[in-house]
Every structure is written in C-alpha cells, then in structure tokens.
C-alpha cells in the first residue's frame, strides 16, 4: 500500500467522522430548539392565563362603579397625569416585574416619597374605590409595597381628583 492510499484512507475516515459529528450537532440543535420553542410557548400560555385572570378580577371590581373598564382606566390615567402635573416623576423602570405580574400601575416619586394609584374593593362593600398609595422606602416601592393614604369614589370630577392628589402630595390640606 502506498503512502498516497494511506493518506486518502485517513482523510476518508476523518471526513466520515466530521460528517457524523456534524449530524450529531445538528440533531442536538434541533432537539434543543424544539425544547426552547415548547418552553416559550408554555410561558406565553401561562402569561395569557394570568392576564385573563387579572382581567376577570378587574372586571369583577369594576362592576360596582357604573363605569366601563376603559373609563376606569381613563380615571386612573388622569390621576397619574395629576401626579406629573404637580411635579411627580414617573419611574417607568421601577417595579416592572410586579407591575406586569399583578397589574400594578406606575410609581411616581415626589419629594423623596413614592406614590401610586389603583382600584381597591373592600370586603364589606360591593362598590370599588380609587386609592392613592405611598411609601417612603425605595425598597418597598421597588416591589410595589405601599400604604393606602387616600380613598375616593369614581364619581369625582377632575378638579376633585386633582385636589386629592395635591392633598396626598402634601401640597394642600385635606
């Protein structure tokens, strides 16, 4: 057997091994990709189920207001705009995870304190209310843990809502 034949045999064996290795890598990639897509689909479905539960909870709270869900959102948006109008700084990056998970609203910082508005329903009443919550601890604000400091009905005018915000911020007396 010549040296040339031996080299060709060795090159053939190396080529077969490389092709086999490539097939194994490709198979593992496809298997991993399929697993990743299945996990991503599962996460998406879990998120959709969570959002559906949140919407059902919100709708059950909104029932007693006499307002539609869109109108309730507009009232809460108005309170948030009043925070900003009175000097509050919207902290978009604060508490993002819990805002998404529990449907909490944005947090605002004013004069070293953290504020948020939301809807609350008391056990002894079918009627839900809007609430302004506050904390002086940034670590609590980061996880959305605040004390309710003012509660009021949905029927208030814009000027009355502005006054509640100004009182909560300490700009006016109750």
Image (tube, rainbow, N blue to C red):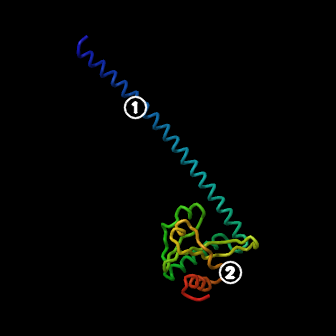
Is 46 positioned to the left or the right of 109 in the image?
Answer: right
User: Pointer 1: what residue?
Assistant: 22
Is 87 positioned to the left or the right of 134 in the image?
Answer: left
Viewer-side residue, 29 vs 136: 136
Quadrant of the snapshot with the N terminus: top left
Q: Quadrant of residue 131?
A: bottom right
Rate crowding at label 2 as few (under 14), some (14 to 19) or many (20 or more) other CA atoms within 10 Å: few
Identified at 74% across, 70% down, the residue is 123
| CB-based contact (under 8 Å), mark 1 and mark 2 | no
Q: Secondary structure at mark 2?
A: loop
Q: In 3D space, how far apart are the residues under numbered discs 1 and 2 (Cα atoms)?
A: 69 Å
Residue 2 placement (x, y as % from top left) = 23, 12
Residue 12 placement (x, y as % from top left) = 32, 21
Count the labels in the image: 2
Viewer-side residue, 138 vs 110: 138
- Which of the labelled discs sits on residue 155, or is there none? 2
Identified at 60% across, 52% down, the residue is 46
Q: Secondary structure at mark 1?
A: helix
Residue 16 placement (x, y as % from top left) = 37, 24
Q: Quadrant of residue 80?
A: bottom right
Q: Quadrant of residue 106?
A: bottom right
Is 13 positioned to the left or the right of 53 in the image?
Answer: left
Quadrant of the snapshot with the C terminus: bottom right
Residue 59 placement (x, y as % from top left) = 69, 66
Is 120 positioned to the left or the right of 146 in the image?
Answer: right
């Amino acid at each position: 057997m010549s040296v040339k034949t031996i080299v060709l045999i060795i090159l053939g064996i190396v080529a077969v091994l490389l092709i086999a290795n490539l097939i194994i890598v490709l198979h593992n990639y496809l298997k991993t990709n399929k697993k990743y897509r299945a996990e991503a689909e599962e996460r998406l479905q879990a998120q959709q189920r969570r959002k559906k539960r949140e919407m059902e909870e919100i709708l059950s709270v909104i029932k007693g207001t006499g307002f539609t869900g869109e109108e309730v959102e507009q009232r809460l948006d108005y309170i948030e705009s009043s925070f900003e109008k009175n000097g509050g700084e919207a902290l978009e990056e604060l508490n993002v995870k819990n805002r998404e998970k529990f449907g909490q609203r944005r947090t605002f910082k004013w004069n070293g304190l953290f504020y948020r508005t939301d809807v609350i329903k008391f056990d002894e009443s079918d009627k839900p209310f809007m609430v302004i919550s506050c904390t002086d601890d940034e670590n609590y604000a980061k996880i959305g843990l605040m004390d309710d400091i003012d509660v009021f009905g949905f029927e208030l005018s814009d000027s009355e809502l502005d006054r509640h915000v100004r009182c909560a911020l300490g700009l006016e007396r109750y």
